[in-house]
Amino acid sequence: MKILTSCFAIIVAMLFASAAEAQQTINGCLIKRRTNCPGANLSGVDLTKSNLSSADLAGANLSGANLSFDKIAEANLTKANLSGANLTGTVLTGTYLNNANLARANLDKADLAQATLPDANLREASLAGANFSMANLKGADLTGANAKGAVFIMANLANANLTRADLTEATLAGSDLRNAILAGVKFCKTTMPDRSINNSGCPK
């Protein structure tokens, strides 16, 4: 009986040790839900499949970081630097990305439904298959972005810059494009705000 008790105690201790190791601390920032790390330097860090939901990372440097398949829902990433970051398949629903730098970031198949991104920099970002339903992208810069198959249902794109963006097979149903810059945008099998299909940019 004593042997069984000792074995149980060892197993429990090992489990607690594993859980403790699973929560990384990088440059003073504890990587976990609801962490409070405004201005943290997490540049180039591999945080694949981490859970940073409800975290405060305002102004943080996450440039070049691997955040693929993370959960960062309802977090504060206002003015964060995410340039060149890998956000493939990442859940960013309801997250604040006001004035964030997402230039050349990979957001393929990311979920940004109801996210707040006014004046965000998404220049040359890859947004293929991403979900921006009901997101606020007012004044955002999407110049040269690859938004093939992206979903912008009921999104606010007023005053956004979509110059040379690729909207092939994208869905813009119900979105607000007032005063948006659409110079050189590629429309092909694109569902427009009025639900009409725009094929003006399809190969002849």
Image (cartoon, grey):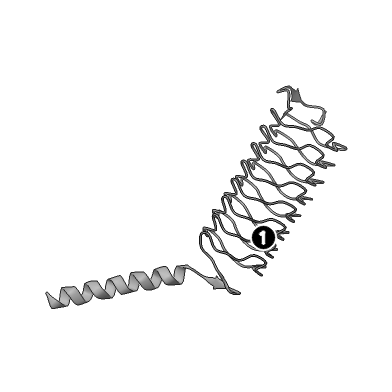
Residue 37's place in the image compared with 187, above or below, is: below
Residue 69's place in the image compared with 192, above or below, is: below
User: Label 1 crowding class (10 Å Cα cut-off): few <14, some 14-19, many 20+?
Assistant: many
User: Viewer-proximal residue, 175 or 189?
Assistant: 175
Residue sitting at the far right: 183
If the image is split into quadrants, where does the C terminus sit?
top right
User: Viewer-proximal residue, 147 or 134?
Assistant: 134
Residue 96's place in the image compared with 11, above or below, is: above
Q: Residue at x 68, y 59 (%)?
A: 85
* Quadrant of res 2: bottom left
Q: Amino acid at mark 1?
A: Ala
Residue 124's place in the image compared with 158, above or below, is: below
Q: In the structure shown, which secondary structural element does the residue marked by tag 1 occupy?
A: loop
Q: Position of residue 174 (x, y in %)?
A: 69, 28
User: Viewer-proximal residue, 20 or 195?
Assistant: 20
User: Viewer-proximal residue, 64 or 132?
Assistant: 132
Q: Position of residue 153 (x, y in %)?
A: 66, 32
* Quadrant of res 42: bottom right
On the rendered structure, is 12 left or right of 20? left
If the image is split into quadrants, where does the N terminus sit?
bottom left
Q: Which residue has dot 1 on it? A: 58
In the rendered picture of this protein, how many numbered marks are placed on residues? 1
Q: Position of residue 37 (x, y in %)?
A: 61, 66
Q: Position of residue 154 (x, y in %)?
A: 67, 32
On the rendered structure, is 28 left or right of 128? left
